[in-house]
Amino acid sequence: MPHSASSEFPDAVSSPGPIWETELKLLISPDDLNRIRRHPLLTRGGRGATRKLRTIYFDTPDLDLRRRGVALRVRRDGRRWVQTIKSGGSAQGGLQRRLEVESRVSGPRPDFLAIREEGLARLFSSKQRREQLKAVFVTEISRTTCLLRPAPGTVIEACIDHGRVRAGDRVEPVCELELELKSGAVSELYRFALQLLDQISLRVGIRSKAERGYALCRNERLLPVKAHRPALRRDMSVGDAFKEIVWTTLGHMQANERGVLVTHNPEFLHQVRVSLRRLRSALGLFAKVLRGPELTSFWSEFKWLAGILGRARDWDVFMTETLPQVQRENRDDRDLAILAKQGERARSSARRRLREALVSQRYLSLMLKFCAWLAGEEWLATRKGAVRRVLHRSVPHFAAGILEHRYARVKKRGRGLKSLSVAELHRLRIAIKKLRYAAAFFSTLYDSRRTAGILAQTRRLQDILGTINDAATVPRLIKTAIDRAARGPERKPGEIVVRWSDDRARRLRPTLLTVWNRFRHVKRFW
């Protein structure tokens, strides 16, 4: 999730001392550690230097620095002690940009006299804050470093880190590759990672060592992350708005990806699916000005991923929402337990296929290629004439046109709502979803009081139509779950669930009409 530079030290950016650090973090398996150390792309200029690093992170008991987006550390590197302060910047697509200030110090404690940048010096000028600072966690890393020149004008420092983060008795292993851009285009970091991916499995990492240390320090549980709205401004160009929207949706996806891989919490899967829907919707918003073979290829691959996510999510809804409600209303029907057992097997199979997809070469390559395309702005460089002029215009006029078009599509799909078939309701649901996502993406261009009505009513309509659509998927899921060779009682619970789902969908029809009428009378904010 992006972090903004703290207003506590606004002058830090303009000070001659600080530098901007830009790096791509990639997670590797410990089993691949020796292979990546010997990889030809990393040993072309020699095997690199390996050294032991012990880094102590400091903060107050209530983690005041963390709240301000600041990391203060003192690192032992051989015989030297180096103090580093990192602040501000952003993290998107695994790419982390932070303001970094380094200075030599005499020992393992912070030296406030070494902080000469005005903004940072002001932050640490409080005697009370300085006295409260204590070591909160430590990293102990074996780092192999080599300098690479993978393309003309591009210099990358590659660091292979293996070790651990320790906060008290809690420990988390570290095994990652950091690619720091010293000169050249940001997209070259992703392209270099793609070359490594041919032989070694790499996952984009979104958490810094500091973030991992703070999570250990506070014993934070891994929790699902919901979407947040892109930070658009009315003076932004259409191209810049596109980047902000897509980087934001990618961040939402990556924030929940790990939860899908290491937990059974269905909300992580739900949020990854929502993020992919938002991403595809975002690409659709700008399709007319971005069309080309690259976008067509990405669209096809995202559709592949959406299919796998959709099947897994359908089973989650069935097994955690639909079937438990049917069981509560039919407590004496023991045959439902048979369906639950078979359904759980099908759900586990769908979840396993999803996890395999998220660690597959196909998915990892897709993410790196898409980020390289986005960061390299190839979609802008190849545009010409009127299309290029559109991308350079300010975004409000473009947004209003998109929103009006999607609003009209919803109104058209909703005509004769009372008599629409399930298939027609499904098409209406898709149109409402596209309008809702577009309204959320562009909402920060407008007064929040004006956007609230459309956002609330489209959300409610989408929820109702989603429940009706869930009922339509039940027969297919039951057909999959029940062994075709099964006889007798196994077929009875399937019929009960289908009837229950159909009844619930029918009962929602009057509510749907009521909410639809409210939506029709909400004033458009654009």
Image: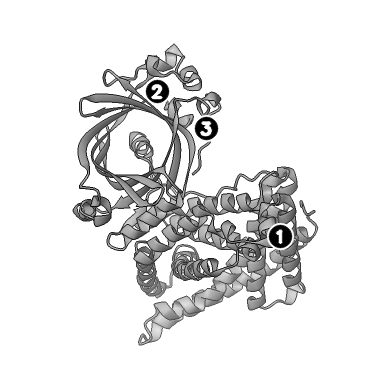
In terms of sequence position, does the residue under pointer 1 or pointer 3 come before the other? 3
Q: Position of residue 386 (x, y in %)?
A: 70, 61
As drawn, the residue found furthest toward the front would be: 152
Q: Amino acid at mark 2?
A: Thr
Q: CA distance from mark 3 to mark 2?
A: 19 Å
Please name which of the two marks, 3 or 2, marks the residue nearer to the observer: 3
Is the C-beta separation of discs 1 and 3 under 8 Å? no
Which is more toward the observer, 296 or 307?
296
Q: Is residue 215 above or below residue 204?
A: above
- Which residue occupies 24% across, 25% down? 80
User: Badge 1 is on which residue?
Assistant: 402
| Image quadrant where residue 467 sits | bottom right
Q: What is the x, y in percent for residue 480?
A: 42, 79
Which structural element holds mark 2?
loop
- Left or right position of 16 against 520: left
Residue 263 in sight in this render: no
Residue 5 badge: 3
Q: Which mark is residue 60?
A: 2
Q: Relative to 197, is 138 above or below?
A: above
Tell me which label, 1 or 2, sits earlier in the chain. 2
Q: Quadrant of residue 220?
A: top left
Q: In this image, 142 relative to 285: left or right?
A: left
Going 61% across and 49% down the picture, which residue do you hit? 240
Mark 2: few/some/many CA within 10 Å (<14, 14-19, 20+): some
Label 1 vs label 3: CA separation? 32 Å
Local packing at callout 1 (Cα closer than 10 Å; few below 14, some 14-19, many 20+) is: some
What kind of residue is marked 1? Ile
